[in-house]
């Protein structure tokens, strides 16, 4: 952590929340002690439960209970340890926001945009069909923004698109449509 926080341009760093309270506290302490007091510190995030894991996958690695409860429990632990936020699926954003407050950062992977094409019933237009890849807990960019996400992680829907630039533009438009209007 001490080496990473000193790199130029680093704004966000993450650790796994399953490393526990003491590991997260050590990461926060290393960040705080490495940089001068007036330096802009990178934000520390704790990864909760991977978006590729559903309840069955969690049981398979010995973690009982629904992902939603485990994620909120890990988010509370992250906040207690001094983390600035968490990485969590879009399904848990509202619950994390209630449990940890409006200033706690929530970074959301598992984003799959609305796709154009044939909807059910054969009509052309926008559909909520997603290519999920290995993701189990997903949402559209608009759904994640409306839930209260601070940052979205969007990779394969852009890099795997036939026209990545057009895909990125469409995602930006979808995000813009979901932002609160003043």
Image (tube, helix red, strand yellow):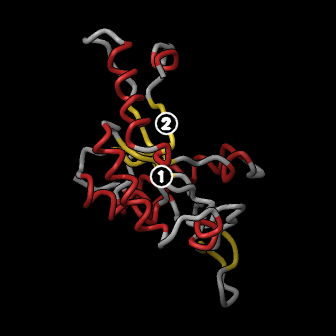
- In the displayed orientation, state which residue is furthest to the top: 36
Residue 176 in view (yes/no): yes
- The numbered disc on residue 175 is none
Residue 45 in the image: state x and y as whole percent. Answer: 42, 39
The part of the image, by quadrant, that contains residue 164 is top right
- The residue that label 2 is drawn on is 14
Residue beneath the point at 66% across and 78% down: 124
Q: Earlier in the sequence, mark 1 or mark 2?
A: 2
What is the spatial separation of the Cα atoms under label 1 and label 2, in whole angstroms?
10 Å
Q: Secondary structure at mark 2?
A: strand
Whether residue 6 is situated above or below residue 31 in the rendered picture = above
Residue 114 visible in the shown view: no
Residue to which mark 1 is pinned: 48
Camera-side residue: 172 or 138? Answer: 138
Task: Give the mark count.
Answer: 2
The relative height of residue 116 versus residue 104 in the rendered view (above or below) is: below
Question: Dot 2: few (<14), some (14–19), or many (≥20) neighbours within 10 Å?
Answer: some
What residue do we see at 62% from left, 73% from top? 56
Q: At x 51% / y 19%, what residue is drawn? A: 4
């Amino acid at each position: 952590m001490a080496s990473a926080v000193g790199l130029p341009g680093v704004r966000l760093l993450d650790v796994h929340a399953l490393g526990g309270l003491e590991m997260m506290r050590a990461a926060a302490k290393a960040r705080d002690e490495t940089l001068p007091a007036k330096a802009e510190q990178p934000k520390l995030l704790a990864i909760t439960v991977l978006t590729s894991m559903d309840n069955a996958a969690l049981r398979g690695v010995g973690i009982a209970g629904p992902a939603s409860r485990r994620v909120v429990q890990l988010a509370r632990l992250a906040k207690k340890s001094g983390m600035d936020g968490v990485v969590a699926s879009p399904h848990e954003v509202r619950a994390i926001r209630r449990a940890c407050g409006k200033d706690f950062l929530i970074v959301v992977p598992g984003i799959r945009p609305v796709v154009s094409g044939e909807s059910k019933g054969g009509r052309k237009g926008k559909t909520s069909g997603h290519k999920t890849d290995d993701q189990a807990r997903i949402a559209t960019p608009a759904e994640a923004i409306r839930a209260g996400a601070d940052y979205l992680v969007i990779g394969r829907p852009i890099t795997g698109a036939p026209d990545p630039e057009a895909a990125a533009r469409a995602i930006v438009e979808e995000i813009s449509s979901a932002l609160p209007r003043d």
